[in-house]
């Protein structure tokens, strides 16, 4: 098992929960993402065209993801978060501690851990955990992969950075939008929604939460609030 050590030194219970979920299989923490907001809106990535696909009915499916990316060799979790946010939306953030950490395993099972606060290290809000289906050639030693997610408040206005697109959704609409994402055209007509893309999305675009956003969709469908909501 290879992990960024500072996070699990600060919160051993988080590593123990991952061990329990994986039931003896090896796991690796491979990515970091942010529940990025400015107090009024949450912000989501519109995935790049290379990840889009046509559905059997001909509509174009485009992913919605959290802001974040892969850990680089020797990189700490919080350092990765700051780097990825700066690259993707060109802004600094303030990382916010959660009340507890939720673990979404294989897009269905949800567990929680609420370790006591660790001085100088914010508790993450979420772990997305699933079998290693797509990175076996890079991480053959890891049977299960995990992404850790923190709440983060923007300290500056976001820009498009190196993203294809950036979606802003009023926080009050988040669960509604993620439970049953409307077509892109309908979504843009909702009050307070912002959408900036490098080129216009085709009119038949449907949006589908992926990775961290998919975990939050699972929580919304189960009626479970995010542990970041209302955190101090």
Image: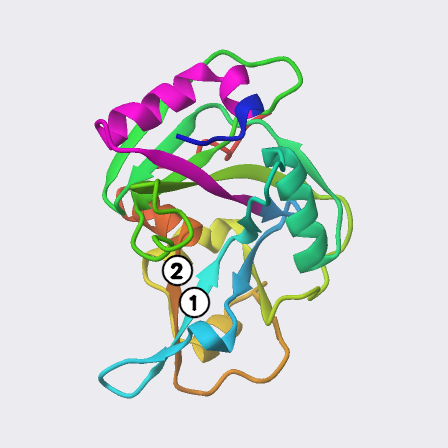
- Residue contact at pointers 2 and 1, CB within 8 angstroms: yes
Earlier-in-chain disc, 2 versus 1: 1
Residue that label 1 marks: 63
Q: How many marks?
A: 2
User: In this image, 140 relative to 40: left or right?
Assistant: left
Task: Give the Cα separation between the discs numbered 2 and 1.
Answer: 6 Å
Classed neighbour count for the residue bearing mark 1: other residues with Cα under 10 Å, few (<14), some (14–19), many (≥20): many
What label sits on residue 93 in the rendered view?
none
The residue at which mark 2 appears reads as 209
Q: Quadrant of the C terminus?
A: top right
Q: Which residue occupies 32% across, 39% down?
A: 104
Q: Position of residue 221 (x, y in %)?
A: 28, 48
Residue 17: in magenta span: yes
Residue 199 visible? The answer is yes
In the picture, measured across the screen, residue 15 lies left or right of residue 107, that is: right
Residue shown at 40% from the left, 16% from the top? 13
């Amino acid at each position: 098992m290879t992990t960024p050590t500072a996070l699990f030194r600060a919160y051993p219970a988080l590593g123990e929960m991952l061990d329990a979920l994986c039931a003896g299989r090896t796991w690796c923490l491979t990515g970091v993402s942010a529940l990025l907001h400015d107090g009024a809106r949450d912000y989501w990535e519109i995935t790049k065209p290379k990840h889009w696909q046509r559905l059997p009915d001909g509509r174009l499916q485009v992913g919605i993801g959290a802001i974040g990316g892969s850990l680089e060799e020797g990189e700490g979790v919080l350092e990765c978060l700051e780097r990825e946010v700066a690259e993707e939306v060109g802004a600094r953030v303030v990382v916010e501690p959660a009340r507890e950490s939720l673990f979404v395993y294989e897009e269905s099972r949800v567990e929680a851990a609420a370790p006591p606060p660790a001085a100088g290290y914010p508790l993450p809000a979420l772990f997305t955990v699933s079998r290693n289906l797509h990175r076996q050639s890079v991480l053959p030693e890891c049977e299960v992969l995990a992404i850790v997610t923190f709440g983060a408040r923007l300290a500056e206005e976001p820009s498009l950075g190196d993203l294809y697109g950036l979606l802003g959704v009023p926080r009050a609409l988040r669960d509604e939008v993620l439970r049953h994402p409307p077509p892109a055209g309908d979504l843009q007509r909702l009050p307070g929604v912002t959408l900036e893309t490098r080129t216009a999305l085709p009119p038949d675009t449907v949006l589908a939460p992926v990775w961290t956003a998919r975990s939050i969709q699972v929580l919304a469908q189960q009626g479970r609030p995010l542990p970041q909501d209302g955190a101090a």
